[in-house]
Amino acid sequence: MLSVAGSDPGGGAGLQLDLKVFAALGADGAAIPAVLTVQGPEGLTRAEPVAAGLVAGALRAVFALGPVQAVKLGALGDAAVVAAVAAHLGAHASVPVVLDPVLSASVAAAGVTLLRPDALPALRQQLLPRVTVLTPNLEEAAALTGRAVSSRPEMERAAAALLELGPRAVLLKGGHREADPEAADLFQERGQEPFWITAPRLAGATHVHGTGCALSSALAVFLASGAAPARAAVRAREVLNAWLRAARAGRLLPTAVPI
């Protein structure tokens, strides 16, 4: 397993949480930082992309160590890193890729982002066609499609529009729709009927740090184990629900779960 994502010095999200998820699910993990951040109780205060050449070199090194069963992508910083990652994955088309298209933190200082706005075209055109499962939240889906996304019908239209950008499947997360009595995510795969993955909304769940990172990392592990994208998405959501119920002080504590 490989995660290419932002580094969270507090360990509650990003690369650090990805590695915890991999380990909890019995997978060996490698990690490449694409964005270095400063974040703590006050939120995200600074973010700097890693040089694209360093990311590209690290990708070559990790893939040279042995087979990579799946790749999870998170915050990528800028267009140069997006292009470097897309180019490398293009040479390894058989490896499943999960992209959590992180744009910013839920709490961030003005102007501080995890993906620079001018990198969106590169993400759409170069990276999305390499992706097995795309896992945006509502805000990220809106940025990628250029349309508002809040209601369930809007989620259905957005998922279809996202598929047109190239990924094999989309897991559109609706967890930020706090007016909904249940957490509802929409899964749609190319050539298949879409379906909803729902669960009772847990009190305080929207304030837990790193849920998107954990979901996408778990999904990548299940893809690596041979699960089809739809089954991997359902299983990842089940695992996340269990971890949310056990969360403490706004932090996930990934624990072992049978695959």
Image (cartoon, helix red, strand yellow):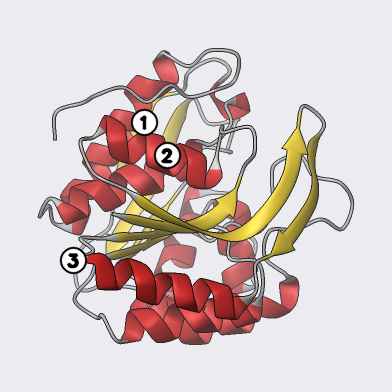
- x%, y% of residue 212? 49, 43
Question: Which quarter of the figure has residue 218?
Answer: top left
The alpha-carbon separation of the residues under discs 3 and 1 comes to 27 Å
Mark 3: secondary structure: loop
N-terminal of the pair, mark 3 or mark 1, is 3
What residue type is disc 1 on? Leu
- Horizontal side, residue 131 vs residue 191: left or right: right
- x%, y% of residue 136? 50, 56
* Residue at x 10%, y 55% (from the top left corner): 226
Q: Is residue 16 above or below residue 139?
A: above
- Horizontal side, residue 59 vs residue 256: left or right: right
What residue type is disc 2 on? Ala
Q: Residues within 10 Å of mark 1 (few under 14, many from 20)?
A: many
Q: Which mark is residue 214?
A: 2
Task: Pick the quarter of the image with the C terminus.
Answer: top left
What residue sits right under mark 1 in the picture? 240
* Residue at x 53%, y 51% (from the top left corner): 137
* Residue at x 57%, y 80% (from the top left corner): 53
Question: Which quarter of the figure has residue 68?
Answer: bottom left
N-terminal of the pair, mark 2 or mark 3, is 3
Q: Residues within 10 Å of mark 2 (few under 14, many from 20)?
A: many
What residue type is disc 3 on? Pro
Q: Is residue 192 above or below residue 229?
A: below
Question: Is residue 59 among the parts visible in the rendering?
Answer: yes
- Horizontal side, residue 111 vs residue 181: left or right: right
Q: Are marks 3 and 1 in contact (CB under 8 Å)?
A: no
What residue sits right under mark 3 in the picture? 67
